[in-house]
Amino acid sequence: MSILYKNALLVDFETGDSSKVDILVEENKIVEIASKIKADAEVVDLDGNIVMPAFCNCYFKSGEAFYNSYLNAQNSYCNGLQSADGEFTQNIYFGGRTLTAEEKNCVRDFLTYKNLLAGAVYFFDFSNVENLSNVDIISLWKNKLNAVTNRQLSMFASAGALETDDEEKENFSYIEDIAQLEEKQLDNFCVDLKENVIVKVGQNLEEMGKINSKTKSMPSEYIESFGILDNHAIIVGSNCFEKDEISLFSGYDTDFVLLPNDDARSGRRFANLNLLKELNLGIGSGSFAEIDFFAFMRQILSYNSFVMESSNLMDERKVLRMATIDGAKIMGVDSKVKVGNPANFLVLNYKNIFSNDIFKGIIYELSKEDIVYSVVNGKIICKNGVFVMENQAKYDKIKECIRSILRSN
């Protein structure tokens, strides 16, 4: 089936250009972009509204998002576990029980729909990892520290500094064996890592400071020492890094994900945006369920203006790219609205923009309520903040499952 989206104002975040065009979609892909296209197709009149790439939420965790937004912290908790082979599993507990596989899928679907309502057509759920290895630097540091401590303890005992009987000496010998094994495993940890690696670092300055004080090196150097950066690394939590550390990362094939919503809640601060802006940056919602990319973009730009007292660190077009095509690029996806690409895009209400600068207008004057259509694979999924009929029915069913989980606890 062919669909012709007529009278679109197509905005290009790379060149800064905008043009009035029609967009022809066939079999889920864009096959033509031109003015006044004539085709035997279903016609959707966009009435001069803005067409732009869909938002990309390149980092969120469905389990924690569900926990933070919908569960009572006094009788529930969410726990992410990283196994020895680097694979990440997410367990969601509520009311003293683990949610069933069906319930966990329902939670994931619920938050997927929340992403779609916020205009995020591309998104990566960190709690359902299949194609990426995940490294928690804090866990590695603690394991390394424990291994070294065990090794020092066994050496201390074997030197006769402690009076031990044969059984205790045997125990210390066992500790030394474990310590050597732990160190060997950690030293070789990155050998079998997959090509793409998500590196979760200290999400606040306190944790980063602990690494610094214990290892006597910058956290970035510690990450480098494991060989992780030899892979394509995606650094989550780059808000905390200093100037020299960003320079170190820039020598590798490294992408960065900022979590502006988490920063707002915990009082963290962004790293040097003037340096980061030259690198590939994306925006993630962290463990936050209420996704609003317009608010996220405003927060980043507000940091420029009010904290750094500069409007030149990062401009509106760069932030829009971060929230869309750059975020998708981190995930290995080309999300530009162009011929040959999947027909995934947003339609925004142009009538609510009064600024002469369309990029400033999108960020400062529009909100989630101004998303007229979310188009996925050529089809309209959401219209004016509401799912179209068949999608709304599925969303209502998912919401009822969520209510059932809450009622059962």
Image (spheres, rainbow, N blue to C red):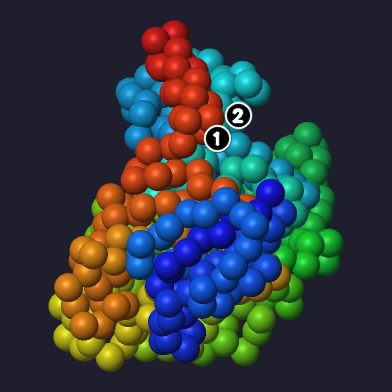
Residue 161 visible (yes or no)? no
Q: Which residue lies furthest to the top in this view?
A: 408
Residue at (25, 73) in percent of width and height: 361
Q: Badge 1 local density, few (<14 within 10 Å), some, or many (20+)?
A: many
Q: Which of 130 and 28 is in front in this view?
A: 28
What numbered label is drawn on residue 108?
1
Instruction: Please say if 263 is above or below 252.
Output: above
Q: What residue is shown with label 2?
A: 105
Question: Residues at badges 2 and 1 in contact (C-beta under 8 Å)?
Answer: yes
Instruction: Please say if 396 is above or below 134.
Output: above
Q: Which of 255 and 111 is in front in this view?
A: 111
Residue at (81, 54) in percent of width and height: 181
Q: How far apart are marks 2 and 1 (CA)?
A: 5 Å
Instruction: Name the secondary structure under disc 1.
Output: helix
Give the percent coordinates (x, y) of residue 142.
57, 55
Give the percent coordinates (x, y) of residue 289.
39, 42
Q: Which of 212 and 387 is in front in this view?
A: 387
Q: Is residue 165 left or right of residue 126?
A: right
Give the percent coordinates (x, y) of residue 109.
55, 34
Give the percent coordinates (x, y) of residue 23.
55, 67
Q: In this view, does 357 lie to the left or right of 106?
A: left
Residue at (63, 21) in percent of width and height: 102
Tell me which amino acid carries mark 1: Arg
Instruction: Name the secondary structure under disc 2.
Output: helix
Q: Badge 2 local density, few (<14 within 10 Å), some, or many (20+)?
A: some
Q: How many labels does the image show?
A: 2
Which quadrant of the view contains residue 266? bottom left
Residue at (44, 8) in percent of width and height: 408
Q: In which quarter of the image is the C terminus?
A: top left
Which quadrant of the view contains residue 148? bottom right
Tell me which amino acid carries mark 2: Asn
